Amino acid sequence: MATDLQGRTIAFLVAPEGVEQVELTEPWQAVEQAGGRPRLVSTQSGLIQGFEHLDKGDTFEADTTVDVSPPEEFDGLVLPGGVANPDYLRTQPNAVAFVRGFFDTGKPVAAICHAPWTMIEADVVRGRTLTSWPSLRTDLRNAGATWVDEDVRICEAGPNVLVTSRKPDDLKAFCQAAVEVFKR
């Protein structure tokens, strides 16, 4: 697995604060261990404040912003969760357009926990089957998606492959499925 993603760059889109830290760091490590190049993308440059549930965690330096780096620069996208992270991103038109760009170009996307909120705003879940944190079930159904309660779901019924998981406890399955999809 050490070179499965050799030569592939994976975007990790996060808000300036509010990302669930483990949902950023574990998939990041999985991409690195598979030989890929993760890049931290945000809506503004500078430090990103991670959270461990409601407590502040570590900070991370953004590599680039959605205004500078278009989806075409990347081979896939990871959308970590946390409640505040996707709630902020879905209010930022440039972040929503960035997410939509991965679907428009057929590139794989992996989203966990509350991250599908941003995809709902991008209007890319209609007709897709996915999972999320349970409180998003109604939001996803109202946006035209089919919601399932599974540790990981890979959906190929759309313009791209979509990997989703519910929560930090699902990270092992999520990381494995995301790397598998990103190497295709």
Image (cartoon, helix red, strand yellow):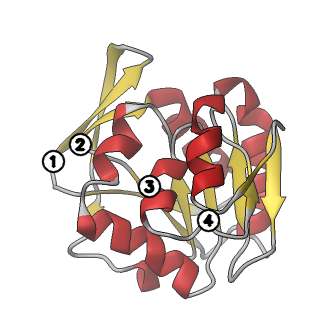
Q: Which of marks 1 and 3 is nearer the N terminus?
A: 1
Tell me the kind of residue under disc 1: Gly
Residue under numbered circle 3 = 118
Please state the horizontal and vertical placement of residue 141, each as a whole percent of the image.
66, 52
How far apart, in angstroms, are the residues tagged by discs 3 and 2?
15 Å
Please state the horizontal and vertical placement of residue 130, each as a whole percent of the image.
73, 53
Q: Which of marks 4 and 3 is nearer the N terminus?
A: 3
Camera-nearest label, 4 or 1:
4
Q: Do the residues labelled 2 and 4 touch (CB within 8 Å)?
A: no
How far apart, in angstroms, are the residues tagged by discs 2 and 4?
24 Å
Tell me the kind of residue under disc 3: Thr
The quarter in which the N terminus is drawn is bottom right
Q: Which of marks 3 and 2 is nearer the N terminus?
A: 2
Camera-nearest label, 2 or 4:
4
Q: Which residue is drawn at 73% across and 65% down?
A: 128
Q: Which residue is drawn at 80% across and 75% down?
A: 157
How far apart, in angstroms, are the residues tagged by discs 4 and 1?
31 Å
